[in-house]
Image: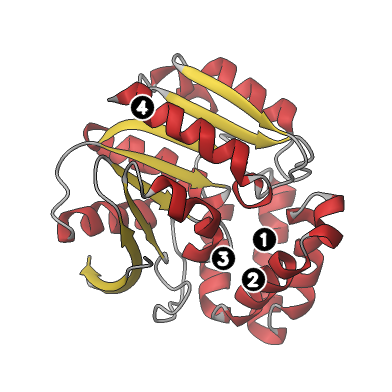
Amino acid sequence: MTCLRQVSANGHEFNCYDSGEGPTLLFVHGFPLDHTQWSAQFDELSRVARVIAPDLRGFGVNAAVEGTLQMSDFADDLAALLDALDISTPITLCGLSMGGYIAWQFWDRYRERLNGLILCDTRAKNDTEAVARGRLQLAERVIRDGFQTAGEDMLKKLLAPENQTELPHVAAQLLTVMTTTHRTTIAAALRGMAERPDMTERLGEIDLPVLVICGSEDVITPAEEMRQVAAALPRATYLEVPHAGHLSPLENPGIVNGEIRAFLGSLS
């Protein structure tokens, strides 16, 4: 049964999915989405773990924010959220895309709270100057014009081509979430992503079991790039998900859920 609750943490209120018993699996959504991005994981994985999936600060039904949201700000929120939920034992954190950027920062700041990482369709390197500049320009356009046009363009890159037509309900829900996210929050996250640090040279320090997942048709973080990330991590396993783009857990949940269950089992 779906269990949504409001949790006060780090001076903010968070809408949060919380269901199941066992080891904690913390899902961190991508940009500019919310906890429902993980809806295809909830039922199956809450049978073997306590599944926590918050709307990040400013996203979903949470209050809007302004300024700049650094990836480390989100990581601090997650640590405070775990405290508010009385979770003191080490957890497995699963982040996708921007959620992966946050995962790197959570490891950097709170590694003692982790027993494993799952990194989906994300990257370790920071933005080039051109990409960062593009994010800042997009932030200004979103404040002025909203996210409808940008969201429609982004949707074409999020899903594998066949899933654009074969999963119309998924595409429609994603667009609704993106275009109803607060403009100021979208801009704040864009600014934060543009300033995020490069983690490439630090991958060898991450002495944790890591499951690296990538859609075979991801055009945002291509599989070859994610294979290189996995190769640089000392204890990584790599999964390439067929018939999936940038949102592999949502596009092909059967394969992804089975691999996550096996990964959680290997940690116990």
Q: Nearer the viewer, mark 3 or mark 1?
A: 3
Q: Is residue 6 above or below residue 105?
A: below
Type of amino acid at the residue the image marks with label 1: Arg
Q: Secondary structure at mark 3?
A: loop
Residue beneath disc 3: 33
Horizontal arrangement in the rendering, residue 156 relative to residue 232 (left or right):
right
The alpha-carbon separation of the residues under discs 3 and 2 comes to 16 Å
Residue beneath disc 1: 135
State yes or no: discs 4 and 2 in contact (Cβ < 8 Å). no
Type of amino acid at the residue the image marks with label 4: Gly
Residue 217 at least partly seen: yes
Q: Is residue 194 above or below residue 182?
A: above
Which numbered marker is on residue 32? none
Residue beneath disc 2: 139
Q: Nearer the viewer, mark 3 or mark 2?
A: 3
The alpha-carbon separation of the residues under discs 4 and 2 comes to 41 Å
